[in-house]
Amino acid sequence: MNEKRIALGVLVLIAVIGGTFAVTRAFFTDTETSTGSTFTVGTLDLDVGGANGSNVEPFVIENIGDTGDIDGSKVWTVNNTGSLPGRLYFKLDNVLNYENGCNEPEALVDVTCLDPGVGEGDLGGVVTIHAYLDGVEKASSTLASANQAVIGNTWTALPAMTIPANSSVQVMLDWSTGENDYGNEIQSDSITFDVGFDLVQIID
């Protein structure tokens, strides 16, 4: 009986010693340190025709009929001078058609000079404008005031048009009106509008 107790005590003692060894023994370790970690914010900077930070040269159409030309175009070089790629957005804003009075020939065909609205001219409805990116047509619309959003909405709905860092693209607007698409109703009428370019960082 005593021998069994002694044997049991020895086993308990061995178990305690073994447990203590398992808890206190060391494991091999190695540590490496990465030094000099840096976060730098990239840049996105839009430059249109060299007019960085200022108003872009306007698109001007005036005195239509002086030379017989009923079409024309304007090209802008759009630069991403930053270090990040960006998606280019393009739109027309503030499209306004002006009647500018109603002379005798115009009054004969537009008897009230109130169509399409008070003070609103007819020219935009007969001028079609096309927007191109690097020579490929992307959107088109007339310049009627009611169609102001068409160019921008069409452009935005297309696959993203990306300008890589330190790269440029060309955006062109051309305008035309058919020689049989207008008459005296557009005499003295004029159109003004703004052309908007936006470059937005691409997030994957």
Image: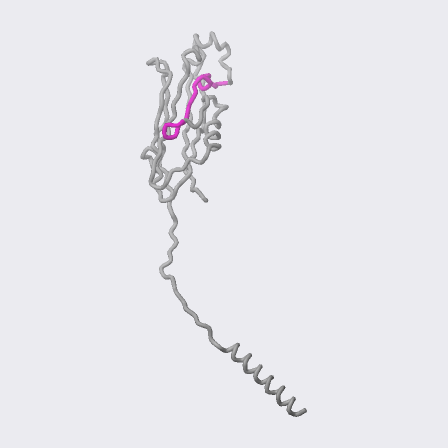
Q: From the top left corner, tell me how far across and down residue 97 is, in percent.
A: 45, 21
130 magenta-colored: yes
Residue in view at x 48 percent, y 28 percent = 149
The residue segment tinted magenta is 118-136
Residue in view at x 52 percent, y 77 percent = 22
Residue 32 vertical position relative to residue 57 in the rendered view, above or below = below
Number of dots carrying numbers = 0
Residue in view at x 38 percent, y 25 percent = 173
Farthest left residue? 50
Q: Place residue 34 in its image quadrant.
A: bottom left
Residue in view at x 45 percent, y 31 percent = 155
Q: From the top left corner, tell me how far across and down residue 108 is, in percent.
A: 47, 7
Residue in front for this viewpoint, 63 or 162: 162
Farthest bottom residue? 2
Residue in front for this viewpoint, 141 or 137: 137
Residue in front for this viewpoint, 33 or 112: 33
Q: Place residue 201 in its image quadrant.
A: top left
Q: From the top left corner, tell me how far across and down residue 113 is, in percent.
A: 49, 13
197 magenta-colored: no
**Is 79 on the left or on the right of 123, as rendered?**
left
Q: Check the picture and name the quadrant holding the N terminus.
A: bottom right
Q: From the top left corner, tell me how far across and down residue 167 is, in percent.
A: 34, 38
Q: What's the coloring here?
A: one colour
**Is 47 on the left or on the right of 93, as rendered?**
left
